Amino acid sequence: MSQGTTFTQHITSLGSKDANIPASLLVSVANACKLIAKQVEQGALAGIIGSAGSGNVQGETQQKLDIISNDILLEACGKDATLAGMASEEMETIFPANKNGSFLLLFDPLDGSSNIDVNVSIGTIFSILKKKTAGDLTEKDFLQAGVDQVASGYVVYGPQTTLVYTTGQGVHMFTLDHETGEFLLIKENIQISPDTKEFAINMSNMRHWDQPVKRYVDECLAGVEGTRQKDFNMRWIASMVADVHRILCRGGVFMYPWDKRDPSKPGKLRLMYEANPMSFLIEQAGGASVNGKERIMTLPAEKLHQRVSVVLGSKNEVDLIQKYHQA
Ligand SMILES: O=P(O)(O)OC[C@H]1O[C@](O)(COP(=O)(O)O)[C@@H](O)[C@@H]1O
Ligand SMILES: [Mg+2]
Ligand SMILES: [Mg+2]
């Protein structure tokens, strides 16, 4: 399709050929994200800056915008007749929608919460599954592996508001045009270069990492004089959504590995609404996504708020890190 095609046209055209594509639901998600973008742009003028003074089920302090974004998504998507129910980082359990709905929506309503107050890119991440069994909706309906996703994507609220999505037919990127209020196509079938000289990791956790991650980062830092024989650059935005966006645009590797701070936690990021949707996009763009040893998209889903270690991005780098974990 040509540049300038609206997101609604793009997804409706795909949806008209395949009933498994949640076209109307994706349009609802995009519309909700336009409303969130407005709040983000207004910042302090809209009274959205600062802590909400509450905590979520994961023990994290909620920002006002975490809650506002969650409410906007519930309200805008709950009306969609094809949606059976939702789950979110900000809600302990599931939120039923329509009895006859056939899709399930999971989201991180606001990713990069620590960046809200400092005007750095943040985003919304979403994953869509099919409801596989008839009857009342339960949490179990949501516990599906990443390979079962029928769509995923994110919207990044940065200098531009950009929507990226996949339904398993490539990865496509749209930018919000404030004149028309539409997301307009800017790039179709994005591919990530298999090699990179850029890595993203929170270096302050270095002393807590496992040996394979230490080895990989040490080798990057050794530059042209080391075994990799090339200089690497480091970027860390601390919003997964913005770090993944950079990787889709120009390659790179992103890591949030398991570390010794709390050995009982498999990682910081959440499988169902952070790692799985991003893995679907990355794989569709020719990259790879693993928890160190295994492909993230085939990991069994055991809990709504399950955590996972994440290594994703340019294929050759991810393969190397995986090899170090298997050594
Ligand atoms: O504080 P750290 O270690 O830099 O963590 C940053 C990571 O945490 C996250 O902000 C977690 O997501 P939420 O903001 O949705 O909780 C990721 O986006 C980001 O990659
Ligand atoms: Mg997040
Ligand atoms: Mg969040």
Image (cartoon, rainbow, N blue to C red):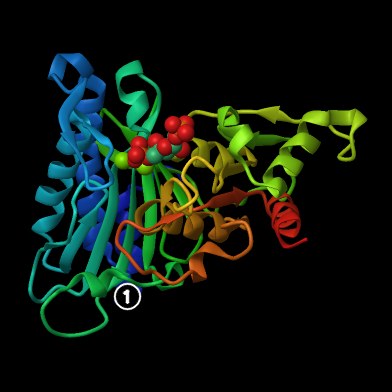
Residue name at image x 20 percent, y 53 percent: 28
Circle 1 Cα neighbour tier, 10 Å, few/some/many (<14 / 14–19 / ≥20)? some
Give percent across and percent down for residue 211. Answer: 71, 46
Height in image: 2 above or below 23?
A: above
Q: Is residue 154 above or below residue 202?
A: below
Is label 1's Cβ within 8 Å of ligand 2? Answer: no
Residue farthest bottom in this picture: 134
Left or right of residue 270, residue 133 in this image? left
Say which of 26 and 239 sits in front.
239
Classify 319 as above or below 236.
Answer: below
The residue at the point 34 percent across, 76 percent down is 18
The amino acid beneath tag 1 is: Asn
Q: Dot 1 lies on which element?
A: loop
Residue 244 relative to residue 314: left or right:
left
Which residue in the protein does label 1 denote? 20
Figure check: 249 above or below 267: above
- Image quadrant of ligand 1? top left
Q: Position of residue 55 (x, y in %)?
A: 20, 37
Q: Is residue 131 visible?
A: yes
The quarter holding residue 106 reads: bottom left
Q: Point out the image quarter for the N terminus.
A: bottom left
301 relative to 63 in the view: left or right: right
Give coordinates of residue 131: x percent, y percent.
24, 76
261 or 203, nearer to the observer = 261
Indicate left or right for 125 with 207 as reference: left
Q: Residue at x 54, y 60 (%)?
A: 284
On-image quarter of the C terminus: bottom right
Residue 239 shows up from this direction: no
The image quadrant of residue 282 is bottom right
